[in-house]
Amino acid sequence: MALIMEYMHAGNLRDMLLNKRIVMTWVLRLRFCSEIANGISFLHNISEKKPVVHGDLKPSNILLSEKLHCKIAGFGEAKLLELTKPRKASSEQNNIQTELVFSAPEQLSGNCRPAKEQDTYSFALIIYTILARELPISGFSSTSNYLENVKQGGRPDTKHIEICENSSTAEKQDRDILKCLESAMSRCWLQEPNSRPNMLGIRDELSCLLNQQSQENILRGVSAALSEIRINRPENQHRSVPLSSFNTLTGTFIQGEAWFKSSLTCCLFIQ
C-alpha cells in the first residue's frame, strides 16, 4: 500500500501560525482543526485490526495546499499498533527536547506502547497553537520546565485564548467556534489516556460546526490569509525526495531516497 501526496504549495501550518502578519479568521481555524481531525481519525480507523498511530503530530507536519487545505505528513514515526512493543525514549530523543513538545505525558515518561490516545493529545496541542498562535512552550522559562510541567499534569498557558474569548469585538459565531475548539482541546489533553475521546467523535463535532458556516465566510478567510502567503511553485520538476518504507515484519520505517517528480512530497509504502 502506498500513500502519495501532491506538492503542498503553502508550506506548513507552523510557519503560517507564527507569522502574525497573516490574517486568520476563526472559521479558517475551524477548518484547519476539522481537516486535521478527519485525517487522524482516518489513520486510527484505517483497519479494525491494524490501526495506524502517527506518533509525531505537530504543526510542522501539517502541510497546506494552494487553497489552504490540510494534509498530514511526517510519517517517520508512524506505527501499526498490532506490531509495536513498549519503547523507551533514547538519550538522543531526550536531547532533542523541542521535538517532544507535542508529545503526550506518558510518552515523556518513556517505556510506553504507541497508542491512538497519544495522537489525540498531540491534536489538542495543535488546536492550542491554532487558537493562541503561540507554541505550547510560550510562557515557560525553558523547554525542560515545560516538559516537566506536562508530566505533572500542567498544560500550556491559555491566557492568549482567554483574551480572544472575552473580546467584545468578537462576533457570536466566532465565539461559538472558539468555545467548541476549546472544549475539544481540553478533553483531548486529559492526563489519563483512557479519558481522552475517540477522534471519530471529535471529527464529527468539528465537521458538524464547519458545515454550519457559510461557504462565503470560509472563502473570505482563505483569501485573507493567502494575501500574506508566498505560494511556492517548484522550478525543478524532477528531484530526489525522501521515501519511508514500512517493514511489516519489524514494525519499523526504513528511510531511503527515490527519484520522483516534485509534486510528490511524501510517499509511504507498506510492504
Image (cartoon, helix red, strand yellow):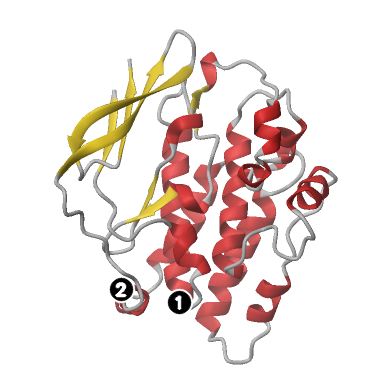
Q: Which residue was labeled with disc 2?
A: 215
Between the residue at mark 1 and the residue at mark 2, the CA separation in whole angstroms equals 13 Å
User: Foreground mark, 1 or 2?
Assistant: 1
Q: Position of residue 57 (x, y in %)?
A: 53, 43
What amino acid type should be assigned to the residue bearing mark 1?
Answer: Thr
Quadrant of the frame with the N terminus: top left
Place residue 269 in its image quadrant: top left
Using the image, tell me which numbered label, if any, was put on residue 9: none
Quadrant of the frame with the C terminus: top left
Q: Name the foreground residue: 95 vs 116.
A: 95
| Left or right side of 229 for 191 | right
How packed mark 1 is, by other alpha carbons closer than 10 Å (few <14, some 14-19, many 20 or more), is: some
Q: Name the foreground residue: 189 vs 109.
A: 109
Residue sitting at x 33%, y 58%: 69
Which residue sits furthest top? 249
- Can residue 269 be seen in the rendering of this structure? yes
How packed mark 2 is, by other alpha carbons closer than 10 Å (few <14, some 14-19, many 20 or more), is: few
Secondary structure type for disc 1: loop
What amino acid type should be assigned to the residue bearing mark 2?
Answer: Gln
Residue sitting at x 42%, y 70%: 28
- Can residue 194 be seen in the rendering of this structure? no
Which residue sits furthest right? 152
Q: Which residue was labeled with disc 1?
A: 25
Image label count: 2
Q: Position of residue 64 (x, y in %)?
A: 35, 57
Q: Is residue 39 above or below residue 135?
A: above
Q: Position of residue 133 (x, y in %)?
A: 57, 68
| Left or right side of 65 for 58 | right
